[in-house]
Image: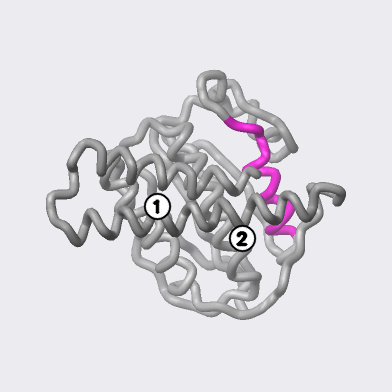
Amino acid sequence: SHDIKTPLSAIKLNAKALEKGLYKEKDKQLAAAQSIGKRADEIEQFVSEITNAASEDFMTFEVTQSEVFLSSILAKINARYASQLALSGTEFAIENYDDCILSCDADRLAECLQNLIENAIKYGDGRQIKLSFDKVDGCELITVRNTGCTLEEKELPQIFESFHRGSNAAKVQGNGLGLFICKRLMSLMGGEVYAEIREKCFCVTLVVKLA
């Protein structure tokens, strides 16, 4: 049910853009309508999975380890968020990186990045969301950074706990599972995740093993 929020936010944004007539060209109007249909299909699939798993442990995750190019993951993320964030006036930047092969579950890693970007959208100030990269000890470090962090540093040790919501979440809907899910998935993929506050920006880094 947590994953439903990602396509739902895209549906709402595209619907608002169509309602306000932001798309003047017919092809852009068609693309927005098709995006709504595609995201609705995703929600339908999630609902089906929820129904099938209703009697199972909701914190059980399946990970299929494989090898994937970093560029492939980032292309999917850029395709999903670039236009959405442009509409809302948020600068979305993917810094230069050296392409490499990652050892991970490609879909699960993309899910982790989506969770982090969704959090950045909800809890940031809407000015900038940036992805940056580094390599350390045979691992690729992928950092999602958003401006406008109001979380207190003393809260960082608790943010990866299930159902935990920080002091900056009082006016934002959520269930406190996004970062918990990231931590579980990264652990199952043999990686790590950690968070820090730098210059009033909230930064979460995924540590992914190189193939």
Residue name at image x 21 percent, y 36 percent? 20
| Amino acid on which disc 2 is placed | Val
Secondary element under disc 1, as helix, strand or loop, is helix
* Camera-side mark, 1 or 2: 1
Residue 82 location, quadrant: bottom left
Give the crowd class for mark 2: few <14, some 14-19, many >=20 residues within 10 Å: many
Residue 158 location, quadrant: top right
Q: CA distance from mark 1 to mark 2?
A: 33 Å
Task: Give me the disc on residue 3.
Answer: none
Q: Which mark sits nearer the N-terminus, 1 or 2?
A: 1
| Amino acid on which disc 1 is placed | Ile
Q: Is residue 18 above or below residue 106?
A: above
Q: Is residue 176 above or below residue 34?
A: above
Residue name at image x 56 percent, y 40 percent? 196
Image location of residue 201, percent across then percent down? 44, 36
Q: As rendered, which of 9 and 124 lies closer to the eye?
A: 9
The colour scheme used here is: one colour
Highlighted magenta segment, given as a residue range: 174-187
**Residue that numbered label 2 is attached to:** 207
Give the crowd class for mark 1: few <14, some 14-19, many >=20 residues within 10 Å: many
**Residue that numbered label 1 is attached to:** 36
Q: Is residue 203 left or right of residue 105?
A: left
Dominant SS of magenta comes to helix
Q: Which of the image's four quarters has the N terminus?
A: top right
Q: Is residue 23 left or right of residue 123?
A: left
Q: Is residue 176 left or right of residue 23?
A: right
Q: As rendered, which of 211 and 174 lies closer to the eye?
A: 174
